[in-house]
Every structure is written in C-alpha cells, then in structure tokens.
Image (cartoon, rainbow, N blue to C red):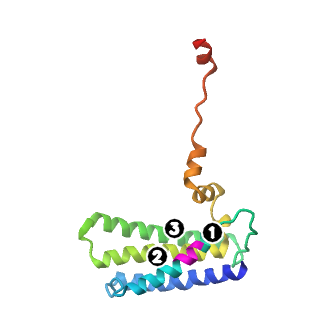
Amino acid sequence: MNRTAQMCFTYGCLSSMGVFIWYVNAFLGRTQLPASVWIVEAFFVVHAIVMLMTFHRRPGASLWAPVLTVTPNRIRIGKLLLLIAMINFLMCAVIVALHNRASSAKELTMALTSLALLNTIYIAVHWAFRPENLFPSSLLVFISNPFLYCFRRQPRLQRNDRSRQSRR
C-alpha cells in the first residue's frame, strides 16, 4: 500500500498544479471549457480511479503510513490549503448560482476548475498525512456513512415513568 500511497500523493500534487494553472488561465480569461470530450473523459477516468482508491476502506485492513512525516505545522498547512480551496469553490459556486442561467463560460470554467482543485488538493493532503491525523474521529465516522451516522445519532424517545404509571 505504501507504493499506492506514493503514487496517489504524486497524482494529487501534479494534478493540483495542473488544475491550478488551468484555474489561473480561466481567471485571466485565456481559457474556455475543453473543446474535446475526450480530454474531460480521460481526466475523469484517472481521477475517478484515484478517488475510489482514496475513499476505499476495508474493515480490518492494515493502515498505510503517511507519505510525509506528520508534524503539527504540516497538518496546519494541509488544513489551510483545504480551507482556501473550499472557500474558493464556494465563492465560484455562489457567483454561478447568482447569475443563474446567464453565467459566462469563464464563470463556469472557474467553478469547475475550483471544484477540481479542491478534489486534487484533498487527494494530496489525504495521502500525505492520513485522514485520522487531519480530522476529528466524529467527522470521519460521519463522512464514512452519513445516513447511518444520522440514524444512530437520533435522540431516542424515552417514556416518562410517571406518565406510564398515570395511565394504569
């Protein structure tokens, strides 16, 4: 798994740089959406494979070691990168939502590239430090299965003994 972790981390870093260049070009108005569907499909296939490997969890599987040495400063930098990418994506999504159907190709390209940037940065940070070192355990449990988490977390209605006795 260590080789897989290194390869996924490398993919996350290289694709983050590529998507960032694409994002800057979109911001400057020098790029449009890809003209060929094959470019999008090729990126999607590779990205989907890496995402499946990133989120695949087998019960009882041996845990892989982080690619980078985990230090508090590196964890802060990783969280900061994720936070900046998330805020950037939310701002782009709000701009597109406010313009509704009148959004330009530039705005749509920026929204798509900011989402891809958020994904690729997460992949790099995930494989670099392991999610257990980045996020609280309650968030990891929620992300693993949100429906089950919400179902188990519902407050149980407990009957009051007095009301039960008064009915008898």
The secondary element bearing badge 2 is classed as helix
Q: Position of residue 115 (x, y in %)?
A: 44, 72
Q: Earlier in the sequence, mark 3 or mark 1?
A: 1
Q: Position of residue 148 (x, y in %)?
A: 58, 50
Q: Position of residue 110 (x, y in %)?
A: 37, 76
> What is the number of the mark on residue 134?
none
Would residue 125 be counted in the magenta stretch?
no
The three-letter amino acid code for the residue at tag 1 is His
The secondary element bearing badge 1 is classed as loop
Numbered range of the magenta stretch:
48-52
Distance in Å between CA atoms under marks 2 and 3:
14 Å
Would residue 77 be visible to someone looking at this image?
no
Q: Nearer the viewer, residue 57 or 24?
A: 57
List the residue tagged with mark 2.
116
List the residue tagged with mark 3.
83
- Image point (49%, 70%), residue name: 84
Counting other residues with Cα less than 10 Å from the Cα at mark 2, is it few (<14), some (14-19), or many (20 or more)?
many
List the residue tagged with mark 1.
56
Locate the C terminus and report the quarter of the image it occupies: top right
